[in-house]
Image (spheres, rainbow, N blue to C red):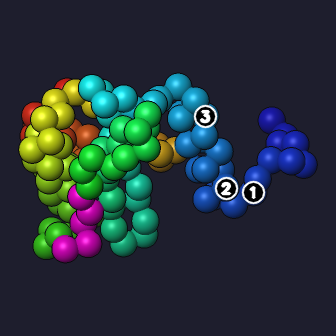
Amino acid sequence: ATMSKLTPKTKSDLRARRHRRIRGRVSGTEGKPRLSVFRSNKFLYAQVIDDIAGKTMASASSRGAKGKGMMEDAKLVGKKIAEEASKKGVKRVVFDRGGFSYGGVIKALADAAREGGLTF
């Protein structure tokens, strides 16, 4: 399959494009906010977002995490975001993988968030 000339070439462009496609389907409300995940080369970030109000209700990142690697950090961030969200009374979320493939650290974060008490 050949890509059209208009298709973005860089990894980040392709991810942004996938993310836009996901965001067409996934939107957070106050009762069921969006759990948005971002993975950089070093760190992981998670936010719980109410898109209607345009507000971030809770956030967590692996910047201070003392895990042994990305996988452990992912579990810590998943736990932390679940805690933060629970404080705000959030139990149900909709998962936004941010254009990243659902595997590896993204999956670890999601599983840990589920264990921490979020349902999605």
The quarter of the picture where the N terminus appears is top right
**Farthest-out residue, front:** 53
Residue at the location (65% across, 50% down)? 14
Q: Is residue 6 visible?
A: yes
Contact check, label 2 and label 3, Cβ < 8 Å:
no
Could you give the CA–CA distance between mark 1 and mark 2, rounded to whole angstroms? 7 Å
What percent of the width, then of the height, locates residue 32? 30, 27
Q: Which residue is mark 3?
A: 21
At label 3, the amino acid type is: Arg
Q: Which residue is mark 1?
A: 9
Quarter of the image holding residue 120?
top left
Q: Which residue is mark 2?
A: 13
- 78 and 101: which one is in front? 78
Could you give the CA–CA distance between mark 2 and mark 3, rounded to whole angstroms? 12 Å
Which type of secondary structure does the marked residue at label 3 adopt? helix
Q: Residue 91 vs residue 17: left or right?
A: left
Disc on res. 33: none
- 70 and 49: which one is in front? 49
**Which residues are the magenta region?**
60-64
**Farthest-out residue, right:** 5
Contact check, label 1 and label 3, Cβ < 8 Å:
no
Within-10-Å neighbours for mark 2: few <14, some 14–19, many 20+: few
Quarter of the image holding residue 115?
top left
What secondary structure prevails in the magenta region? loop
Q: Is residue 71 visible?
A: no
What percent of the width, then of the height, locates residue 82? 15, 44
Q: Earlier in the sequence, mark 1 or mark 3?
A: 1
